[in-house]
Image: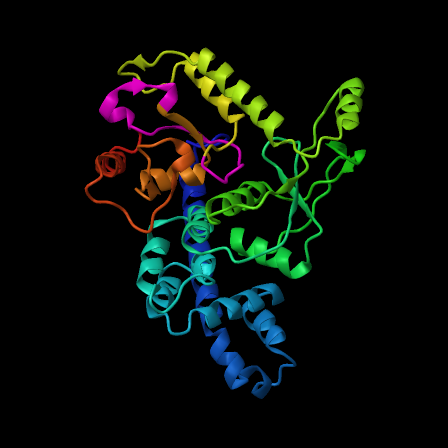
Amino acid sequence: MRKGYCKLSKDERALHEQFVEFGGDARKWINECKLLLLKIQRMRIWEKRGFSSLYEYSCKLAGISERLVDDSLWILKGLENKPELMKVAKEKSLSAVRQVVSVATEETDEFWAEKVRRMSISELRVYVNEWRLVFEADSDEGDYELFPETKLGNGVSLRNVTRSQQESLVDARTGELLESQSAPSVVQINPAGVQGVPSGLQGDSLGSQLKTRLDLNSEPRPLKVIIPLYLKPEIAEELCRLNNDDWNEPINELLKLRREMLERERPVPVKTKSRYVPALIKRFVLKRANCKCEFPGCAKQYFELHHADRFGVTWLHDPARLFALCSQHHQLAHQGLINNEDKNISEWSVRADVDDHDLRYGIDQLVTKFRRVAPGA
């Protein structure tokens, strides 16, 4: 039962159920109206009925806003010659297929239709983003300056990037343009000195760009990355005085030192029939991940601790095989759409389709089936 729920009287329950029924019908009929918009536009029916524009026609007759009209027309144009996706749009909704319109082709129509049927919109968004990074070559050139957000999991900001490059980046990650957001200035350290840096883009952009540059190019070009840090004034002054042109070696040594420290702190695995992760192991995993998703290229807040070897098989809480994942990557893992799950998480990527012979996928299917039969389990 959700927080804040109260029991309803007989009359209240009847009223609530009636509202839910009408709400579902309203969504259904609005979707039916949106599916007709492209044909209405091409036949100029709105003009023949005396309306000044398609927007006025849609607003007055169906309550559809101008933004939804534009969005629906864009999706419908992308669904032309894609009968399977169009069928899903009619079954679920037009917005359900929005995430795949820019990547689906006539040849991959059935593939993406199956994904839309199986996944929620948020899971589909993440899958499409990762699919682009793995299966589409990155031909974009040019240097990026990435400014990570200091607030946990919030984001990065881009500078010295053209508007078209920004639109391409955002479309690759979310399918929508991102609105700038204000954030407090923080201290950044670079050879030029100390200055304030605002932050703006959503949280997974930094990781995705780094992943694209590192994984898809045979000889990755160095990235110019400026990392905001909260430092004591004397430490900041000393770092600025160094004016080191090559920070790769000292930063690599720092990261190596952190890995060694974490390795010394790593708790021993615990074998138990209780699925609850021991507090010591949970604290260690979250410290290692900094409470963020550990999937390569993702910087979202973690949602779940994921047993890569499946707890139902091993009955083991092993910190080396326990990873912090966001909600979407956690769902993709249990849908069998993560590649190299038996290896270190740095080698994980999305896969085009499930492996029916994978023991992990078989276990996940059995667990899902059991939970459907016994929802409270």
Residue range (magenta): 295-320
Q: Is residue 316 magenta?
A: yes
Q: Provide residue 355's location: percent of width, then percent of height.
A: 24, 45
| Residue 374 figure quarter | top left
Residue 370 colored magenta?
no
In the rendering, at what x and y percent does residue 296 appear? 46, 38
Q: Nearer the viewer, residue 292 or 304?
A: 292
Q: Residue at x 70, y 41 (%)?
A: 199
Give the residue displayed 48% in from the left and 72% down from the top.
77
Res 174 visible: no
Q: Is the C terminus in the top left, top right, bottom left or bottom right quadrant?
A: top left
On screen, 208 above or below 117? above
Task: Check the image and report above or below for 62 versus 277.
Answer: below
Against 288, residue 143 (above or below) is below
The residue drawn where x is 41% and y is 31% is 1
In the figure, is residue 91 to the left or right of 201? left
**Residue 57, quarter of picture:** bottom right
Position above or below: 166 against 33: above
